[in-house]
Every structure is written in structure tokens, then in C-alpha cells.
Image: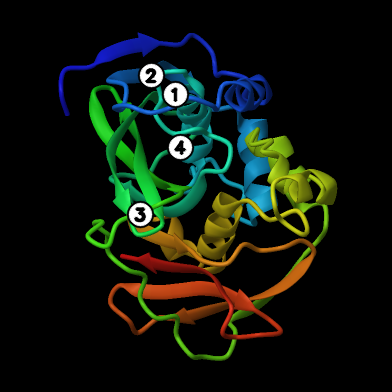
Amino acid sequence: MPESTSRVLTESPSLAPLFVKAALTSRGRGGALPDTVLRREAVQVDRDHLLAYQRICRFTGTDVLPPTYPHVLGFPLQVSLMSGRDFPLPLPGLVHLENRIVVHRQLTADDRLDISVHAEQLASHPKGQVVDLVTEVDVAGQRVWEGRSTYLRRGRGGDDAAYREKAPALPDRPPAAVLRLPEDLGRRYAAVSGDVNPIHLHPLTAKAMGFPRAIAHGMWTYARTLAALGPKAVEPGESSVWFGKPVLLPNTVEVVVDPDASPLVAGLRSRKDASKVFLTLTLS
């Protein structure tokens, strides 16, 4: 990564104004990625917020941070970076394609987290352009958590566009669990995560963005699938997820798992149509 400009924020940005700002300044984007690194230092976990997150995602309510929880803390920094006028891709319409999380050691609510976010790897994709938003978490100068979110801006791609590792095949197995997702799931998760993207909140706002109904947050489906895997999912390790079809709300989905695969493979598929895959996940 080239020499960068670091900005330290004293509090987490509010997401609603950032989404509005991004919508109002979406035209005329282009150019290179900014070299900015946004940081928050010595972040203290709010235990009430942690418990609310654990409940909505069905993790066990303890002081241990779920692997996906630091993403929630870093996401406002991602949106702040992407809503800036110097970010080349307009935030409205970006599609979350993939996510990768590495947990180097177990984190708890007692840890004081130094969180930083930067953008890298702006590249062509068969369906447009992709960019990675990288979140890194340190405790006392030691790297303890890393997350990489890959976003797609739909548009003209190239035949020679680089594409990354593809998702493994979802196991053809009976469901390990059946999840019934209510119509208001997006609003409930938004109240905890702060992610108030209109596509998740209401059928009318989702329709304005091209969806027939509101869709579940990708990071909720990621977290909920991990939670369904039990204690192994909250241990130090690495998980990767590929988002497939959007999960329209309300919906009934199946969790499928191949525990014998190395790494473990799991995912979410439609209860009505097993060929419709919403998410594929690996865990090691």
C-alpha cells in the first residue's frame, strides 16, 4: 500500500447522513482510490450493544465478540470513506460480493480496539468494477482481526477482467436448520448495526432501488450462518463468504453444512428452490 494519509475520528460516524451525502454526490465519480486511512482508537465495546447484536444474529450472549462484530464497528468508517467525493465509485448501487474475516485471537468486550479502514484493489470485473474495503483491528499494537469486503459497481466489464476465487459448490445435503425470516428483519438489524441502506428497510424504498421487496443485510446472513455452526464459529480462524441471490423478506431459508469438507463449507439456500443459493461460506 502506498504512503497514506491517516485521519483519526473521535466518534463513530452516523450512517444515515452519510448515505444521503453519497446519494447527492454520486455523479461525476472516477479516478484512483484515495490514499486515506480512517481510524478510531481505543474503542470500548458497549456491552448492551454487543448483546443486542448477539440476539439478532443468534450468537450466545457472552463477552466474547462474534467474528462478524468488529465489522459492525468498522462499517461506519467504510461508509465514510466511500461517501467522500474523492472515492471513485458511487456508493448507491454498490453490491456486496464477498467478505473475508480472519480472527487472530479471541476478542472480548474488555479489549480496547484500534480500528482502521482503507480501500485497495480497484479492478475490472466481468460485470463492472470491484473494490476492496479493508478493516483492521489492533489491540495494544498487535493485529487481532482483519476483514476484507469486496464491492461491485455494475457496468461494462472486460473479457480479460480479473476475477477472484470462486465460491465452492454448496453441499447437496438435508438442511441442518430452517430459518424463517420476518418482513421487518432488515429494520431490526439496521437498528443494531446502523446500516440504514434503504434496500433493507421497506418494500417501497427497496423498489426505488430496483428490488421487489426489502432484502436481508448480507452481513446478517453471514453472521446468522456462522451462529448456526456452533462454538467452532467463534474461535480464532478464517471465514470467507460469497453472496449469491439477495434474500427477499419475508422468506424461509435453509442452512446446509458439509462438516467433512476441508475447509468446512456451509450456506443458505431457498426452502422452495434448493438451486437458489443466497450465500456460500467456508470456515477454517
Q: Identify the secondary structure beneath mark 2.
A: strand
Task: For marks 1 and 4, give the CA distance.
Answer: 27 Å
Q: Identify the secondary structure beneath mark 1.
A: helix
Name the residue located 32 percent from the left edge and 81 percent from the top edge.
261
Q: Identify the secondary structure beneath mark 4.
A: loop
Q: Amino acid at mark 4?
A: Thr
Q: Which part of the image, by quadrant, shows the C terminus?
A: bottom left
Name the residue located 65 percent from the left edge and 85 percent from the top edge.
273
> Which residue position is annotated with label 3?
157
Classify 122 as above or below 216: above
Q: Residues within 10 Å of mark 4 (few under 14, many from 20)?
A: some
Figure quadrant of residue 161: bottom left
Q: Position of residue 136 (x, y in %)?
A: 33, 33
Q: Nearer the viewer, mark 4 or mark 2?
A: 2
Relative to the observer, which residue lies in front, 29 or 253?
A: 29
Task: For marks 1 and 3, give the CA distance.
Answer: 24 Å
Q: Amino acid at mark 2?
A: Leu
> Which residue position is annotated with label 4?
108
Q: Which part of the image, by quadrant, shows the N terminus?
A: top left
The mark found on residue 47 in the picture is none
Relative to the observer, which residue lies in front, 100 or 114?
A: 100
Q: Residues within 10 Å of mark 2 (few under 14, many from 20)?
A: many
Q: Earlier in the sequence, mark 4 or mark 2?
A: 2
Q: Amino acid at mark 1?
A: Leu
The mark found on residue 38 in the picture is 2
Q: Position of residue 30 (x, y in %)?
A: 38, 28
Relative to the observer, which residue lies in front, 155 or 106?
A: 155
- Judge from the rendering whether residue 21 lies leftward or rightward of residue 259; answer left or right: right
Look at the image and name its color scheme. Answer: rainbow
Name the residue located 61 percent from the left edge and 32 percent from the top edge.
47
